[in-house]
Image (spheres, rainbow, N blue to C red):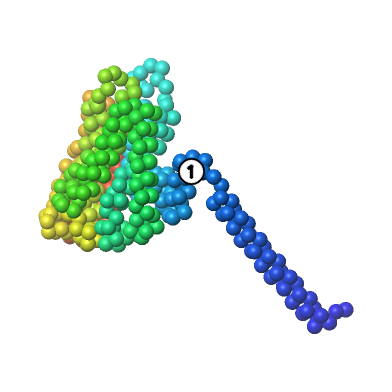
Amino acid sequence: MPSLKDLKNRISSVKSTQKITSAMKMVAAAKLRRAQDQALASRPYTSLMDKIVSKISSKATGTSIDLLTGKPENKTQLLVVFSASVTYVTALKFYEKKIENFDFDWLAVCWLCVGGMLVTASSNGFNQIFERHLDKLMSRTKNRPLPTGRLSVKAAWIITIINGTAGTLILWFMLNPLTGILGLASLISYSFIYTPMKQKTSWAVFVGAFPGAAPPLIGWAACEASLQEPIYISPAALSLFFLQFMWQFPHFWAIAWRCHDDYKKAGFHLLPSAGGKDIKSAFQILLYTLFMVPIAMLPCFPAFGIAGLTASIIILACGIIMLHPAFMLFKTLEDKWATKLMFSSFIYLPLVLLALLANQYF
């Protein structure tokens, strides 16, 4: 029978063997990763896109690849793609009831999502390129790829132009020319008109509301222009445009209120009053939220036939609920109510659009 000392020696020997084995595995894994990296670095480029992606990824983090693939950066960009795609499906179901032998085209929905995401990513890319020096000054943007140097300006231009070109071409050729024109107009107005205006005047918010309200217009027109000749933008499509146009003001001003001090560092003038977070700004936020409620009811007119009684009640109720934080912000001027208004606006738009979509099914 082995002694206690022998048992201790055996246990110590086993532990040593396990440590050596573990170390050998780690060395082998490191060698394998090194060999894979060398093979990737030495292989020839097979295409121009392959060369661009490889060059960019060697200098940048995952953020640059997200920009290249059109991955949305924030909730607002997700809402852009969501509102366009949901409105497109709503229009398809709307016309499915009116046209015999109508084929529901899910592939077109996918093309709209891809094209819309790329155009949105391109707009965001131009914005970050033009404001890269200002982004360094603000807490909310100082960690973006360009201010931190994780992505070069040259690489950002390449990514942005690829996204914008590919997105516009997809909307134009895979859907119809009107959709491509509207997408390109939104990109240009957001990137080259709204973005430089932000430092000059609070009217930039009004200008930015046009490309911001374009997604439902693009979604409805993408379906409608594929079904009728001559191509035109119908009153039904315009009613959805004005719905989202009015939503832009309380939504964006709530964000501007929360980020006012940060925006001031970059010289942005985004709240409606020159005094910033004062009673005048709060009053205009409340006023535009009030205007939003009846404007949002435009799709409910019987002449358009987009919304029935149930959808109309839901839209009206959502607008009234959104009035509460707007009124409390006017009453108290407290930041917490701007935060609540911002989050209620994020909820309001999807609910309204989903109510319009559900109306086509029930």
Left or right: where 237 falls relative to 148: left
Residue at x 22% of width, y 59% of height? 266
Callout 1: helix, strand or loop? helix
94 or 29, which is in the foreground? 29
Residue at x 38% of width, y 37% of height? 166
Question: In this view of the protein, can residue 308 be seen by the observer?
Answer: no
Question: In this view of the protein, can residue 21 be seen by the observer?
Answer: yes
216 or 262, which is in the foreground? 262
Q: Mark 1 packing: few (<14 Cα in 10 Å), some, or many (20+)?
A: few
- Using the image, determine if residue 94 lies above or below residue 276: above
Specify the farthest residue to the right: 1
Left or right: where 268 falls relative to 33: left
321 or 82, which is in the foreground? 82
Specify the farthest residue to the top: 100
Left or right: where 338 falls relative to 112: left
- Using the image, determine if residue 341 lies above or below residue 9: above
Residue 128, percent across and down? 31, 51
**Position of the N terminus by quadrant:** bottom right
Residue 193, percent across and down? 21, 44
Residue at x 20% of width, y 55% of height? 268
Residue 293, percent across and down? 20, 41
**Position of the C terminus by quadrant:** top left
Residue 4 appears in which quarter of the rendering? bottom right
- Using the image, determine if residue 86 lies above or below residue 53: above
- The number of discs equals 1
Residue at the disc numbered 1: 50
